[in-house]
Image: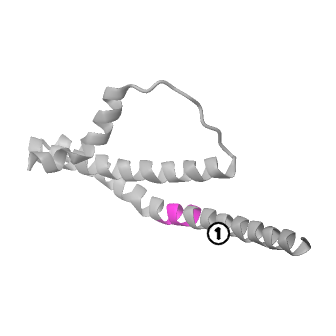
Amino acid sequence: MLNLHFIILLFCLSYQQSLDIKRMFIRYISHEIRTPLNTVCLGLKFMFDDFNSHGESRSRLENLSDIRESCDTAVNILNELLTLDKLESGILMLEKKPLLAWSFVSEIVRPFAVQVRE
């Protein structure tokens, strides 16, 4: 019976170690992606403002706006990944809130508007 307890203990330790490694990997990758992505998002904002102030065509502004939204979506995905990590580690607890179905569906469909227009 002692051997079974020892095996279970080893399994739990290796499982915990693998979770710790996964969390470290998620945090590292999120940081490494977030830094250049934030630079891209900021650059797109400056371009949009510059184009807008110089009377650039509406279609170019729409395309640039779509690119900015996709960039923001990528940042949000990173944030959600980090939130999931916090939930799994017990640092953060979920809170129930009402969901507005139409705005939720609109947010999901919006990134595909570029493909639909073409």
Majority secondary structure in the magenta region: helix
Q: In the visual, does 7 lie left or right of 25?
A: right
Q: In the visual, does 64 lie left or right of 57?
A: right
**Viewer-nearest residue: 14 or 52:** 14
* Residue at x 62% of width, y 65% of height: 24
Quadrant of the image occupied by residue 6: bottom right
Give above or below for 45 relative to 106: below
Q: Which residue is mark 1?
A: 21
Report x, y in % for residue 47. Answer: 25, 51
Looking at the image, the residue that sits furthest to the right is 2
Pointer 1: residues within 10 angstroms few (<14), some, or many (20+)?
A: few
Total number of numbered discs in the rendering: 1
Q: In the visual, does 84 lie left or right of 18?
A: left
Report x, y in % for residue 35. Answer: 47, 61
* Residue at x 59% of width, y 53% of height: 85
Quadrant of the image occupied by residue 25: bottom right
* Residue at x 84% of width, y 71% of height: 4
Looking at the image, the residue that sits furthest to the bottom is 3
Q: In the visual, does 91 lie left or right of 82?
A: right
* Residue at x 56% of width, y 29% of height: 96
Report x, y in % for residue 113. Answer: 18, 44
Assess whether residue 4 is covered by the magenta stretch: no
Image quadrant in which the N terminus is located: bottom right
Magenta range? 27-32
Three-letter code for the amino acid on which mark 1 is drawn: Ile
Q: SS at mark 1?
A: helix
Give above or below for 118 relative to 28: above
Give above or below for 74 relative to 17: above
Looking at the image, the residue that sits furthest to the front is 1
